[in-house]
Amino acid sequence: MKNLTVARRYAKALLIIGEEDGQAETYREELNAFSGLIASEKELEQAISNPLYDASSRKKVLKAVIDRVEISKVMASFLLLLFDKGRIGFLSDINAFYQKLADELKGIARASLVSATELSSETVEKIRTTLSKRTGKDIILEVGHDPGLIGGIVSRIGDLVLDGSIKTQLLNMRESIKRGESA
């Protein structure tokens, strides 16, 4: 829990800086790219965050990586601050929170849509438009398939789950029958 609180705090601080200098979207892209680089290169991640190596050597590696990738001075300073404060290991969590906060700033919500069969692009667009009207936000929809649903769809927007799957309806009906309720 503490790690998430720390990650949220750093993400929020970077977003505030981004709002002030108008570079919030640039920082989003840079943070996401750098976090992805570190996550994909496990040896690099170990070289930067493993406390078995001395701090000065780890910081040199981090500076060398920062110098080779094209990022803004603010992002470079932010990454070095994370290192100096012993928070570089939280980079992926900080990135995840920053992405959410930057989406909120732009009025965007990310949602997932899972269906039993492949949906037409028109149907997906109608669902996206409906979700957008219900939430008042621009929806970015990630579409997936799960034949186990039998039919229908399940949509998730943050903590909200809209389950219109036949599988869930059958399970609910079964529970009603067990309790002796009539449909």
Image (cartoon, rainbow, N blue to C red):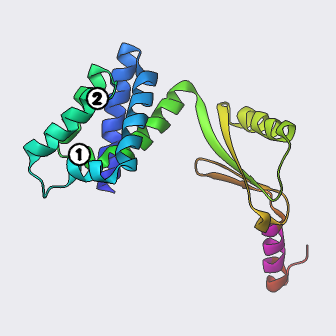
Q: Nearer the viewer, residue 105 or 27?
A: 27
Q: Which mark is residue 68?
A: 2
Residue at image position (77%, 33%) is 129
Which one is earlier in the sequence, the residue at label 2 or at label 1?
2
Q: Secondary structure at mark 1?
A: loop
Residue at image position (82%, 79%) is: 174
In the depicted view, which residue is nearer to us: 72 or 126? 72
Q: Residue furthest top?
A: 21
Query: What stretch of residues is rendered in magenta?
Result: 167-175
Magenta-highlighted stretch: main secondary structure? helix
Q: Which residue carries the number 1 mark?
A: 87
Q: Could you classify mark 1 by the number of other residues whose Cα lies within 10 Å: few (under 14), some (14-19), or many (20 or more)?
A: some
Q: Is residue 173 magenta?
A: yes
Residue 108 located within the stretch drawn in magenta:
no
Residue at 26%, 35% (x, y): give it: 65
From the viewer's perspective, is the residue at label 2 or at label 1 nearer? 2
User: SS of the residue at dot 2?
Assistant: helix
Q: Position of residue 53 (x, y in %)?
A: 12, 54
Question: Tag 1: residue type?
Answer: Arg
Q: CA distance from mark 2 to mark 1?
A: 21 Å
Q: Name above or below for residue 123 compared with residue 105.
A: below
Q: Nearer the viewer, residue 42 or 109?
A: 42
